[in-house]
């Protein structure tokens, strides 16, 4: 029986030797290959995450810059509009002042009349002149208002054109 036990012990030793000499190196190679693949996968994932993060930061910076440009265009449009309205107000005031002066001159002329016919002629003359002046000044004010609308909308129109150019293109694949 001792020999059978010794034979079994020898078989176990032989199996252990084979495991150490053959199986362990294979397991080590498999483990090292798995570790290398895992490292490559982690590196690829980190690279992709870095690229995605950089893309998001770039998009956020571009959006902030575009918004800043929109605010600047709005401020410019408002500045042009306010200045234009002030100018239109001055022109309107000057027109009203001129018409008032014309009315006063007409009233003074009426104080010197000697007949009803002369009063009617002076009144007709001053009324016609006042209407002609009103129409001419109103046309000038309308033209100035149109130019103001165009000038104050120009910065916004430029931003709209830029937005269409920038965001109208399909995204790059």
Image (cartoon, grey):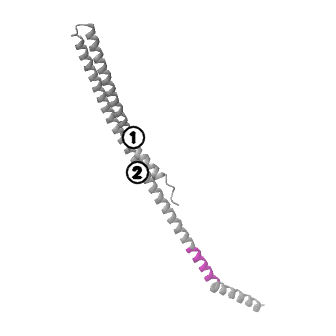
The local crowd at label 1, few if under 14, some if 14 to 19, many if 20 or more residues have their Cα within 10 Å, is some
Looking at the picture, how far across and down is residue 55, in whole percent?
47, 59
Looking at the picture, how far across and down is residue 22, in whole percent?
64, 85
Predominant SS of the magenta segment:
helix
Q: Is residue 96 left or right of residue 37?
A: left
Residue sitting at the far bottom: 3
Residue sitting at the far left: 112
Please state the extent of the stretch shown in magenta in the rendering: 23-36
Q: CA distance from mark 1 to mark 2?
A: 21 Å
Q: Which badge, 1 or 2, is on the more N-terminal residue?
A: 2
Q: Which residue is located at x 40 percent, y 51 percent?
A: 65
Q: Which residue is mark 1?
A: 153
Q: Are marks 1 and 2 in contact (CB under 8 Å)?
A: no
Q: Which residue is located at x 37 percent, y 45 percent?
A: 72
Looking at the picture, how far across and down is residue 100, in whole percent?
27, 20
Q: In front: 172, or 121?
A: 121
135 to 152, vertically: above or below: above
Q: Which numbered circle lies on residue 96? A: none
Q: Is residue 8 magenta?
A: no
Q: Is residue 168 left or right of residue 30?
A: left
10 to 122, vertically: above or below: below
Q: Is residue 92 left or right of residue 55?
A: left
Q: In front: 30, or 158?
A: 158
Looking at the picture, how far across and down is residue 147, in whole percent?
35, 37
The local crowd at label 2, few if under 14, some if 14 to 19, many if 20 or more residues have their Cα within 10 Å, is few
State the SS at label 2: helix
Q: In front: 16, or 28?
A: 28
Residue sitting at the far right: 1
Q: Which residue is mark 2?
A: 65
């Amino acid at each position: 029986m001792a020999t059978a036990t010794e034979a079994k012990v020898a078989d176990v030793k032989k199996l252990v030797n084979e495991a150490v000499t053959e199986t362990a190196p294979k397991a080590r190679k498999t483990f090292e290959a798995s570790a290398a693949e895992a490292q490559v996968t982690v590196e690829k994932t980190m690279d992709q995450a870095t690229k995605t993060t950089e893309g998001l930061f770039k998009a956020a910076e571009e959006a902030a810059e575009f918004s800043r440009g929109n605010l600047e265009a709005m401020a410019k449009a408002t500045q042009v509009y306010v200045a234009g309205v002030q100018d239109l107000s001055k022109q309107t005031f000057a027109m009203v002042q001129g018409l008032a002066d014309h009315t006063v001159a007409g009233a003074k002329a009426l104080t010197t009349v000697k007949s009803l016919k002369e009063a009617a002629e002076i009144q007709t003359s001053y009324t016609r002149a006042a209407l002609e002046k009103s129409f001419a000044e109103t046309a000038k004010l309308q033209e100035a208002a149109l130019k103001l609308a165009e000038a104050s909308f120009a910065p916004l129109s430029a931003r709209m054109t830029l937005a269409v150019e920038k965001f109208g293109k399909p995204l790059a694949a």
